[in-house]
Image (cartoon, helix red, strand yellow):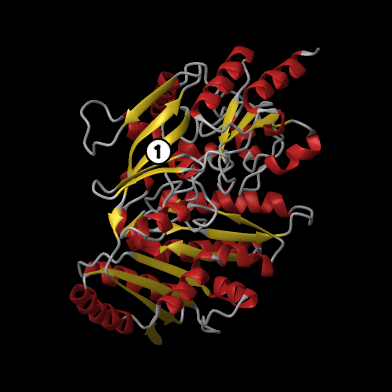
């Protein structure tokens, strides 16, 4: 029996034959996530418990096989791609909500729990789970922890790291430990905080403790229509400049509106240059007072129309337009590449003007849907991968946009992570010394470096299907490993 076959047999003995996938045809669905990167894993194993995850990692460690954790596969930076003939550990079977503690306002979940399912379960008890990525209906909590996911309502409530209290973690050698716990302010080093957002390079979380918030008694959602994106951005700065922090502030440009309306009529105005969603939450009187101020500011900022959802169903329609915008882009082009960058809120208008200039220069359409309140841009570059040269142009355009974000005082990622997508651009923000420190922190958790290798840090092997393969090659092999 070959070494490869013995490896598969050991995995099957742990989780059962039906939960080890290794035939090339069956692996096709696991060679990509929500990004445009692709790589075929050696095998995919689907454990059902912490014990099984631990035993799988012992086998992988003994065989010196790289390991990549995988949730729902909705990630947008190539984080779940298994490079170097790696083993994917898919945690989708571990999907139980183990506990909802109403008194202490926390929940204990397994990593495969879908974000929206947790929120729905909490709301039945008058609570909520605040982080709400646009892929909320499909993304899992384990992936949210790995990427420190955000979402529209993170403007007021913070990203995933602000809501994770502790995690049970399986390390590289199969050992199991806890980082943090049910106490909100534990003493000692914040290893929990280091783990959240580590992009699968430190270990696999098998249980997650999150804090829950009281469900707001009153919610009011406004839709403001503007002639252009600049007017909508001005309104965002004006609202926050008045000392208000709405629960969410989201902008969609004309191209995004067109895409959504082509797919389903959710009432977005045709011919608008941009729409701004503003959501207020709180006590009745507070929301009413803030609502009057917001309406006045939106009108003064040039909104041609301001309306609000008069029912829960209408509110859901407005949010479905925003959260389904990315999927609707398929009505305009066969493919899109989503760039995730951040700029200071006061430079939103300037950054979008620069994105528009890049779009015109390369003669390639770019739709913009973004978290305006915290300056998190999501330019969606539309293309057809079947057309010769399109992928190369898209790669170049994405890099130009990231350079603009950094030039304007921003960052490479707001919520999607670095992964494969942006690792070549890390030197724009971090020195080699910075990255050496990051690598040493990774080494403290995973000394052999077998968790999700080839991600985040520039250099190393060059991969044919990596979006940034040209930039990585230019940096040179081993530029930073």
Q: Is residue 284 visible?
A: yes
**What secondary structure is marked by label 1?**
strand
* Relative to 6, 431 lies left or right: left
The x, y position of residue 154, in whole percent, is 35, 56
Q: Which residue is at 53% across, 42% downward?
A: 422
Circle count: 1
In the foreground, 373 or 42: 42
User: Is 371 drawn above or below residue 76 in the view shown?
Assistant: below
The x, y position of residue 473, in whole percent, is 64, 33
In the foreground, 61 or 271: 61
From the image, tell me which residue sits under label 1.
208
In the foreground, 79 or 364: 79
Mark 1 Cα shell of 10 Å, populated few (<14), some (14-19), many (≥20): many
User: Is 353 drawn above or below residue 428 in the view shown?
Assistant: below
* Relative to 279, 404 lies left or right: right
* Relative to 206, 303 lies left or right: left
Q: Which residue is at 40% across, 87% downward?
A: 305
The x, y position of residue 472, in whole percent, is 61, 34
Q: Is residue 479 visible?
A: no
The x, y position of residue 393, in whole percent, is 67, 53
In the foreground, 66 or 174: 174
In the figure, residue 256 lies in which quadrant? bottom right
In which quadrant is the N terminus drawn? top right
**Residue lying farthest bottom?**
304
């Amino acid at each position: 029996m070959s070494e490869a076959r013995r490896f598969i047999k050991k995995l099957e003995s742990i989780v059962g034959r039906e939960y080890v996938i290794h035939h090339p045809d069956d692996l096709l669905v696991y060679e990509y996530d929500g990004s445009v990167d692709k790589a075929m894993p050696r095998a995919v194993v689907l454990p059902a418990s912490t014990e099984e995850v631990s035993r799988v990692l012992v086998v992988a460690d003994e065989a010196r096989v790289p390991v990549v954790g995988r949730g729902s596969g909705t990630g947008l930076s190539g984080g779940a791609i298994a490079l170097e003939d790696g083993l994917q550990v898919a945690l989708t079977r571990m999907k139980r909500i183990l506990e909802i503690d109403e008194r202490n306002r926390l929940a204990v979940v397994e990593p495969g729990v879908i974000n929206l399912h947790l929120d729905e379960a909490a709301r039945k008890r008058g609570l909520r789970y605040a982080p709400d990525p646009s892929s909320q209906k499909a993304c899992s909590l384990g992936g949210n922890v790995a990427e420190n996911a955000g979402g529209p309502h993170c403007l007021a409530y913070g990203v995933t790291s602000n809501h994770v209290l502790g995690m049970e973690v399986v390390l590289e050698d199969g050992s199991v430990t806890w980082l943090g716990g049910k106490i909100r302010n534990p003493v000692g080093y914040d290893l929990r905080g280091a783990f959240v957002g580590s992009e699968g390079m430190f270990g696999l979380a098998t249980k997650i403790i999150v804090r829950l918030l009281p469900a707001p008694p009153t919610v009011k959602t406004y839709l403001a229509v503007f002639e252009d994106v600049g007017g909508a951005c001005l309104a965002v700065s004006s609202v926050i400049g008045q000392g208000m922090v709405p629960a969410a502030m989201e902008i969609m440009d004309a191209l995004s509106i067109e895409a959504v309306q082509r797919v389903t009529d959710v009432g977005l105005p045709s011919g608008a240059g941009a729409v701004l969603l503003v959501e207020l939450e709180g006590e009745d009187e507070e929301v009413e007072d803030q609502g009057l101020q917001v309406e006045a500011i939106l009108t003064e900022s040039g909104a041609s129309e301001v309306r609000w959802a008069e029912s829960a169903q209408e509110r859901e329609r407005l949010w479905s337009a925003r959260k389904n915008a990315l999927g609707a882009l398929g009505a305009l082009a066969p493919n899109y590449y989503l760039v995730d960058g951040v700029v200071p809120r006061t430079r939103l208008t300037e950054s979008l003007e620069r994105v528009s200039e890049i779009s015109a220069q390369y003669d390639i359409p770019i739709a913009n849907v973004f978290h305006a309140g915290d300056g998190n841009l999501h330019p969606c570059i539309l293309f057809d991968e079947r057309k010769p040269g399109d992928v190369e142009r898209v790669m170049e355009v994405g890099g130009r946009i990231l350079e603009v974000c950094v030039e304007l005082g921003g960052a490479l990622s707001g919520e999607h992570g670095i992964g494969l997508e942006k690792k070549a651009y890390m030197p724009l923000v971090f020195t080699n010394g910075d990255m050496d420190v990051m690598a040493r922190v990774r080494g403290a958790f995973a000394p052999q470096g077998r968790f999700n290798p080839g991600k985040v840090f520039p250099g190393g092997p060059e991969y044919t299907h990596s979006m940034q393969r040209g930039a990585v090659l230019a940096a040179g092999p081993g530029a930073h490993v």
